[in-house]
Amino acid sequence: MDSFVIFWGLSILLFISIIVGLIYLAYRLPKRHGKRKFGLWLSGILTIGLLTLIMATVFEDQFFFKSDAKENLKEHNVELVDNFKIVSNESGGFMDYFHQFKLTISPADKERLIDQIKSAYNYQDQIQDMFDLRSGKIRHSDKDTSFTANYQEESNYIYEYYKPNKQGYTPTWVRISISKTENKLTYERVLD
């Protein structure tokens, strides 16, 4: 674990050093040739670009919009017709990426999505506790393979999707839950 932290710490430090060095050279080289203002402009543009990249990475969850939620849901044929509200959005992970958002949806959308889950060809009314679609499935495949499950638990109607990817790529797992008691939808995506 310590060597892992040291490796990534040094890699990040090297990356930052290279970027700072490039910004410095963008100012210093034009200045040497008598173009100080051009050097200031060039290094200023690079600095703004770097700060924008850092801000977009650090505040990624704040730049999540309704159109992003619709796009993620549409990948799994889940469409929200009525207006909805984003309750929370979280993402992150270094080796294992996760993304989770929760929405407040309309009663009509809730009923339509529950009907969509219940009418799926593989819908199961009773499911064993601690069901996990990934268990017993392959982690990697050169074929375009995916698995889905539609079922209900005590408090949610659930759609699950699992796709083993090619060797070297992490499998994709998505779970979309519709609450039985509230007008809530929860989307979870894990690349692990």
Image: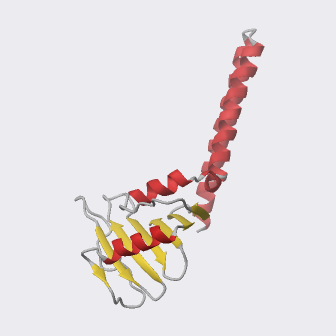
As drawn, 7 above or below 100: above
- Of 106 and 30, nearer the camera is 106
Would residue 28 be visible to someone looking at this image?
Answer: no
Residue 142, how many percent across, how many down? 24, 58
Residue 58, how many percent across, how many down? 66, 52
Looking at the rendered image, the quarter that the C terminus falls into is bottom left
Residue 129, how many percent across, how many down? 41, 91
Please give the name of the residue rendered at 32% of the width and 60% of the height, measured from the top-left corner: 165
Left or right: 22 as drawn, with respect to 118 = right
- Of 70 and 94, nearer the camera is 70
Please give the name of the residue rendered at 60% of the width and 49% of the height, measured from the top-left corner: 11
Colour option used? secondary structure
Residue 159, how many percent across, how many down? 38, 73
Quadrant of residue 61 within the rendered picture? bottom right
- Of 85 and 17, nearer the camera is 85
The residue furthest top is 34
Quadrant of residue 36 within the rendered picture? top right
Left or right: 91 as drawn, with respect to 47 = left
The residue furthest front is 108
Left or right: 47 as drawn, with respect to 154 = right
Would residue 41 be visible to someone looking at this image?
Answer: yes
The residue furthest left is 143
Looking at the rendered image, the quarter that the N terminus falls into is bottom right
Please give the name of the residue rendered at 66% of the width and 42% of the height, measured from the top-left corner: 16
Please give the name of the residue rendered at 77% of the width and 15% of the height, measured from the top-left corner: 37
**Number of numbered labels in the structure image:** 0
- Of 111 and 123, nearer the camera is 111
As drawn, 63 above or below 160: above
